[in-house]
């Protein structure tokens, strides 16, 4: 069963491009809900949502990727996932323009992360999958944030744990 999950990815779009994260990292997908903004946080840190009594930090991957801020539509969703870093694991929500489906990508349909352009992109892209005529950028969610950014996320999540 673990082997089956290993090749399954939740797909979503950001700025018209397809992205994916392994289903083993995804806790749930939520409809967009009110986000409580936090003062003096990084631009990509949108704030907190209340998830069954726990504060979950929400990030905007568009801003993290250097794109314009996510416009909120009826399709906007929050992908709640577990991110691991040097400070341990933390649950985080990521804004997506729309969430699509779970797809299976194996070695035959996956290529290594491209090595052209900036080194930064290759650091957090696991690979590029192909489905039908589309490319799906598979993210390594643990490597999207540097140590300082992960510390901010952990601190934000921890600040609400005692509340």
Image: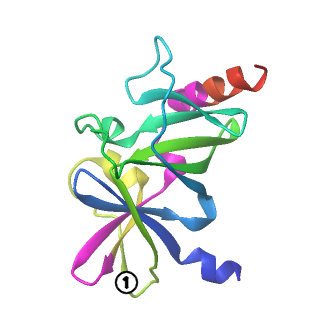
In this rendering, does residue 154 appear at all? yes
Furthest toward the right, the residue is: 162
Q: Is residue 62 above or below residue 130?
A: above
Residue at (56, 25) in percent of width and height: 152
143 left or right, relative to 62:
right
In this rendering, does residue 146 appear at all? no
* Residue 129, percent from left and from top: 35, 74
Q: Which of the 4 image quadrants contains residue 20?
A: bottom left
* Residue 122, percent from left and from top: 35, 55
Disc 1 target residue: 109
Helix or strand or loop: what does disc 1 sit on?
loop
145 vs 21, nearest the viewer: 21
* Residue 78, percent from left and from top: 48, 47
133 vs 124, nearest the viewer: 133
Residue 113 is covered by the magenta coloring: no
Q: Is residue 111 above or below residue 92?
A: below
Residue at (47, 44) in percent of width and height: 94
Furthest toward the front, the residue is: 74
The C terminus appears in which quarter of the rendering? top right
Residue at (59, 56) in percent of width and height: 28
Please give the range of residues in magenta. Answer: 130-153
Q: Which of the 4 image quadrants contains residue 32?
A: top left
Circle 1 packing at 10 Å, graded few (<14), some (14-19), many (20+), is few
């Amino acid at each position: 069963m673990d082997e089956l999950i290993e090749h399954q990815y939740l797909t979503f779009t950001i700025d018209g491009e397809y992205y994916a994260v392994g289903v083993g990292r995804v806790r749930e997908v939520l409809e967009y809900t009110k986000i409580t903004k936090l003062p003096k946080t990084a631009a990509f840190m949108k704030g907190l949502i209340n998830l069954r009594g726990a504060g979950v930090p929400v990030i905007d991957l568009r801003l993290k990727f250097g794109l314009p801020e996510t416009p909120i539509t009826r399709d906007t969703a929050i992908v709640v996932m577990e991110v691991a870093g040097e400070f341990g694991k933390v649950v985080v929500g990521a804004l997506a323009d729309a969430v699509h489906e779970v797809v299976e990508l194996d070695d035959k349909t996956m290529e290594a992360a491209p090595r052209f352009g900036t080194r930064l992109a290759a650091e957090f892209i696991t690979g590029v999958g192909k489905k039908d005529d589309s490319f799906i950028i598979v993210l390594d969610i643990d490597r999207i944030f540097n140590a300082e950014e992960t510390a901010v996320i952990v601190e934000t999540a921890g600040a609400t744990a005692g509340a």
